[in-house]
Amino acid sequence: MIKIVITGRGCATTVSHEGPTVRSAALALQRLVLGWDRHREAVADELGVGTTEIAALGFLYYDGPHTPSDIGHLLNLTSGSVTALLDRLEGAAFITRSPNPDDRRSLLATATPAGRHAMQWYYERLDNVVGKALECVPDVAHGDVVTLANAAGELLAEETREAKQARP
């Protein structure tokens, strides 16, 4: 019996399993992550940037303008690394930096039209792949696939936070 607690949504689920179900799911998710990483690497190469730049640009695409410290926190980067990352994205014309109206000591990074177009292109490619994969799953299970992916992502993030807090 495995108890899964998703703290972000405050729900708890108990899952009982027999045989290799959990291991098979874990290995399948590992293959998904590896495939996703390889796909992101290929897209980054096509766009002339790195995978960290793709992650930062995706953050700006979906969440709007953010400070360099927000980006550093999200990607676990030092302030110097974030500055270099933003320099590369700005050099590729994917972002602009402007004064933060809420804090004159800070800047906001914003995706440019070219940056938004690049991310839209990337996410359309991902949507196509996921759509093809969902064709292999009965329609009634599509919600379960999304639930599993969200739960696994949240639990991995929580376990990572706990592991970091446990370090001296």
Image (tube, rainbow, N blue to C red):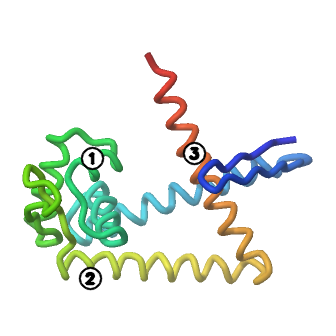
Query: Residue 138 location, x and y as percent?
Result: 78, 80
Whole-percent x and y of residue 146? Answer: 65, 68
Label 1 secondary element: helix
Q: Which sits earlier in the primary sequence, circle 1 or circle 3?
A: 1
At label 1, which amino acid type do we have?
Gly
**Secondary element type, mark 2:** helix
Q: Nearer the viewer, residue 8 or 156?
A: 8
Instruction: Say which amino acid is labelled 2.
Output: His
Few, some or many C-alpha atoms within 10 Å of disc 1 (few <14, some 14-19, many ≥20)? some
Task: Write down the residue under mark 3.
Answer: 156
Is the residue marked by circle 3 packed among few (<14), some (14-19), or many (20+) residues within 10 Å?
A: few
Q: Which residue is labeled 2 in the image?
A: 117
Q: Quadrant of the N terminus?
A: top right
Q: Report the residue marked by disc 1.
A: 72
Residue 82 badge: none
Q: What residue appears at the point 14 percent right and 54 percent down from the top-left corner?
A: 103
Q: Which picture quadrant has residue 121?
A: bottom left
Q: Quadrant of residue 37?
A: bottom left
Q: Nearer the viewer, residue 105 or 84?
A: 105
Please name which of the two marks, 1 or 2, marks the residue nearer to the observer. 1
Vertical position of residue 135 compared to residue 148: above or below: below
Establish if 121 lies above or below 15.
below
- 96 and 44: which one is in front? 96
Nearest to N terminus: mark 1 or mark 2:
1
Image quadrant occupied by the C terminus: top left
Give the mark nearest the N terminus, 3 or 2. Answer: 2
Q: Amino acid at mark 3?
A: Leu
Q: CA distance from mark 1 to mark 3?
A: 19 Å
147 in relation to 117, above or below: above
Gap in angstroms between the C-alphas marked 3 and 2? 30 Å
